[in-house]
């Protein structure tokens, strides 16, 4: 059985290491605000693309990209805040 030392942090999941960099923990409030602003922009862009579906025609599926990006941004903000509380 392998026992971790008290001063060694357990490793984070790979996705969290990829999406949330360690330097973001130095000023978490700033990065949360930046991410929320980017998420709101992506939502507005996605809704705008959906609203202009009659001009885009078969390219309307492109509206899913900023909306998926917004979902990813809001998910990382949620994970960042939950890890800061613990």
Image (cartoon, helix red, strand yellow):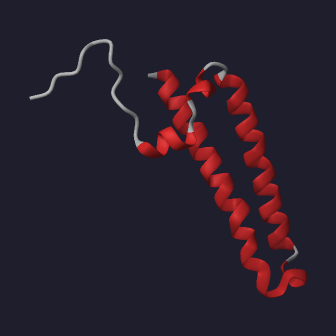
Percent across and percent down for residue 66 are 73, 60
State left or right for residue 5 relative to residue 51: left
Percent across and percent down for residue 32 are 68, 32
Q: Which residue lies furthest to the right in this view?
A: 55
Looking at this view, is 64 or 7 the one in front?
Answer: 7
Task: Report how many numbered discs are placed on residues in the image.
Answer: 0
Looking at this view, is 12 or 68 the one in front?
Answer: 12
Above-or-below relation of 84 to 59: above
Percent across and percent down for residue 57 are 83, 86
Q: Residue furthest left?
A: 1
State left or right for residue 36 relative to residue 75: right
State left or right for residue 72 relative to residue 60: left
**Residue at 78% over, 81% down:** 59
Viewport quadrant of the N terminus: top left
**Residue at 62% over, 19% down:** 26
Q: Residue furthest bottom?
A: 58
Percent across and percent down for residue 17 are 49, 38
Above-or-below relation of 85 to 42: above
Viewport quadrant of the C terminus: top left
Kindly indicate the quadrant of the structure image that contains residue 68: bottom right
**Residue at 78% over, 41% down:** 37
Above-or-below relation of 53 to 36: below
Q: Residue furthest top?
A: 7
């Amino acid at each position: 059985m392998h026992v971790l030392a008290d001063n060694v942090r357990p490793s984070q999941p790979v996705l969290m290491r990829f999406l949330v960099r360690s330097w973001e923990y130095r000023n978490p409030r700033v990065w949360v605000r930046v991410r929320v602003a980017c998420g709101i922009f992506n939502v507005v862009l996605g809704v705008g693309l959906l609203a202009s579906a009659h001009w885009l025609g078969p390219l309307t599926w492109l509206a899913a990209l900023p909306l998926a990006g917004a979902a990813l941004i809001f998910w990382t903000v949620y994970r960042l805040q939950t890890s800061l509380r613990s």
